[in-house]
Image (cartoon, grey):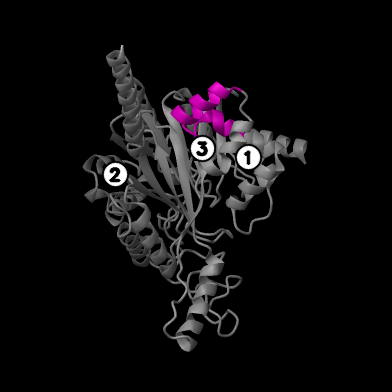
Amino acid sequence: MIEHGNSSVKRLLFLHMFLVVLLSLVAVRAYTVTFIADPHYDPLYKEDSNPNESCRTGGGAAPNITYPYGQYRCGAVDKALDVLVNALRQTTKTSNISFMIGDVILGKHTTREEHDQAIEALYNKVCSGVAGPLYPVLGNTEFYGIGQSSTNEEILSQIKKLAELTGLENISSTAYKQFLKGGYYSIRDGRLKFLVLNTGLYNALQKRTEDDPLGQLAFVRAELEDCRKSKCRVAIIQHIPLMMSTYTGAYTMQQRYSDALRHLYCEYYDVVANIHAAEDHRDEFKLIYCQDNNSGIPLFMLPAISPNRYNNPGYRQVELSPKTGNLMDYVQYYLDLGLANIKTRTENVYTRHRTGHNAPTVNYSLEYRFSDEYGPSIMRHLDDQKLIVATMKTEGWGTYVPMRALYIALQNDPGVWSVFHSHMSSLCYDKKISFICAARAITIESYKSCLAKLQ
């Protein structure tokens, strides 16, 4: 009996150790993705400029005051990007893959040569900080002089040049060949596929009329169908999000293409795990309702590196399940731009008057971890405890059910909204109603109807 008891204890201990090891392996195997969005890099920035006049003209700031790390309403500048690179060196050591999501430069250069040099300089700088490959996601400002009258040949010529400037041709031959067809491509790693779109083709300013510019929609359908057949899951990455913009109150892209993508994603909602987009420079999310309120796709909006919409620079690291593609959790980092510039002035004082003392340093800081910041609020709005455990522990915090619970919490709980709004933007005025409506409205009519109902 004693031997039997000892045997049972040993089996229990073995099982416990096995579970501990298994859980640790699951944690280690989380697929980490780093997103760097909307740098709007401006190599022509002047430290003593006045953004109300021009970020590229010196002498506009108050006497003897400079802003070496940049200013709100300006693009990202070299000194701030150096801080970003240092932060990436520390935080991307375990990152599997990184994406730079346009708009990568501020643009408005007088020559194509200056334009291309700025793009190449930015990619070289950021690549020096990330561990592993840095993949490009095209936005709007990567294109020089492209407008409504531009031909497909002109666009494809610039896309070919961008493959060279971003280094894609040296990262993946398969992605490079796909990219040359229209600036879109896919990357597959086991059961996880990243589908990268070129939403610059759908920019509202271009007013394109084709049903499927450069065959991108057909490409997306083929890739999603391939994943359905081979049982992989997809994370979609695109610069311009779908539906309505909280920032502008209008469609994010031409409506016909927003609708086409939404219908396509919903047709394959069992395949599309999540969507990651930028453009608005705001830390938000959208819910793409596909069949009813209980099924859909979460779309995560990424904060920007550029502070030109009154936001502090920020980048995100996302943890995906390598088996399901589900967003398990994410971590948000930010740079307090105002404090960075103040520290520089303090540093000058230390240098002149307090030699030997440590001068203040400028660094990116951890802003929040999603599960810590919003987990309790999500759980309060999920009634079924079993569902809570299954969803959070197994499926991930960034799946449709918990994100819908967070959406409900944001509508009903002022405390949750206050926290959420503090991360949306450093200085932006409160646009709660706009967010609530834009997060799910699919047409301008439904968006305006929602605004009228809630105001």
Q: Quadrant of residue 39?
A: bottom left
> Which stretch appears magenta?
384-406
Lower sequence index among marks 2 and 3 = 2
* Image quarter hosting the N terminus: top left
The front one of 92 and 136 is: 92
Lower sequence index among marks 3 and 1 = 3
As shown in the figure, which amino acid type bears the numbered disc 3?
Leu
Q: Quadrant of residue 119?
A: bottom left
Query: How many badges with numbers are in the image?
Result: 3
- Dots 1, 2 in contact, CB < 8 A: no
Disc 2: CA contacts within 10 A as few (<14), some (14-19) or many (>=20): some
How far apart are the two marked residues, 3 and 1, measured between alpha carbons?
Answer: 12 Å
- Residue pictured at 48% horizontal, 79% vertical: 347
Q: Which residue is mark 1?
A: 438
State the image coordinates of residue 338 (x, y, percent, origin top left).
56, 68
As shown in the figure, which amino acid type bears the numbered disc 1?
Ala
The front one of 58 and 382 is: 382
* Image quarter hosting the C terminus: top right
Q: Secondary structure at mark 1?
A: helix
Q: Which residue is mark 2?
A: 180
- Dots 3, 1 in contact, CB < 8 A: no
Q: Which residue is mark 3?
A: 299
Q: Nearer the viewer, mark 2 or mark 3?
A: 3
State the image coordinates of residue 256 (x, y, percent, origin top left).
53, 35
The front one of 147 and 29 is: 29
Q: Is residue 102 above or below residue 338?
A: above
Q: Is residue 304 visible?
A: no
